[in-house]
Each structure stands twice: as structure tokens, then as C-alpha cells.
Amino acid sequence: MRRSKLAETFQYRRSSSLVRAKARTYLGGEVKNPEKNIPRVIGFSVLIVAVLYLLMSVMIIGTIPWRDAAVSHAAVSEFIGKLYG
């Protein structure tokens, strides 16, 4: 019996989440006070990524007019094109 694409995707996600959980527990043994520090690091990393995303968006909108960026399917490509040529 052939498995559906949905079943394969679910199996991949379930196994990858188990790998991530194992990695967290392994790292928890290596970190001082993991109950406090691991969630803090995750929160800081999400915050850093959000700030970088906002900065990139501001740079793109500053380079490309917002009306052009709103209808573009590849605003970042247009941004790079305007920067480099």
C-alpha cells in the first residue's frame, strides 16, 4: 500500500521534532540552569531575527517605492538589482 504525501510529510515532521527534542534535552545537560537559560536564549534569538527582518524591510522600502514593492513578487530581487546594478 502506497503512503500518501501527507502521511510522508507528517512522518518527517514527527521524526524531526523528536530529533529537536532530543537535542534540547542533550543541551540541557550542558547548560547551567537550563530551565531558565534555554527559554531565554530562544526568546532572544526570536527577537534578534524579528529585528533583523524589520531592518531588512525598512531598507527595501527605503530603496524601492512601497507601491512597487507591494505589487512585486520578488521585492528582494529588485532591491538587490537596484543596489548592484
Image (cartoon, grey):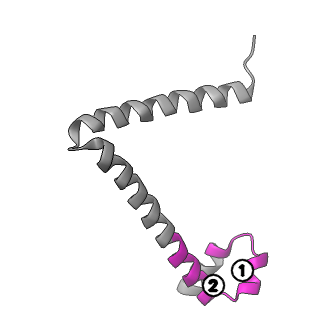
Q: Residue at x 73, y 29 (%)?
A: 5
| Visible residue check, residue 85 | no
The amino acid marked with disc number 2 is Ile
The answer to whether mark 2 and mark 1 are in CB contact below 8 A is yes
Taking the magenta stretch, the answer to whether it contains residue 40 is: no
Tell me the crowding category of disc 2: few under 14, some 14 to 19, or many 20 or more residues within 10 angstroms, Cα based. Answer: some
Q: Give the quadrant of residue 21.
A: top left
Q: Which residues are magenta?
A: 53-76
Q: Give the quadrant of residue 26.
A: top left
Q: Secondary structure at mark 1?
A: helix
In the image, 13 versus 35, the foreground residue is: 35
In percent of width and height, residue 33 lies at 24, 44
How many marks on residues? Answer: 2
The amino acid marked with disc number 1 is Ala
* Residue 69 numbered mark, or none: 1
Q: In the image, is 59 to the left or to the right of 34? A: right
* Residue 23 numbered mark, or none: none
In the image, 60 versus 22, the foreground residue is: 22
In percent of width and height, residue 72 lies at 75, 75
Reading the image, the residue beneath label 2 is 61
In percent of width and height, residue 60 lies at 59, 81
| Visible residue check, residue 32 | yes
Looking at the figure, which quarter contains the N terminus? Answer: top right
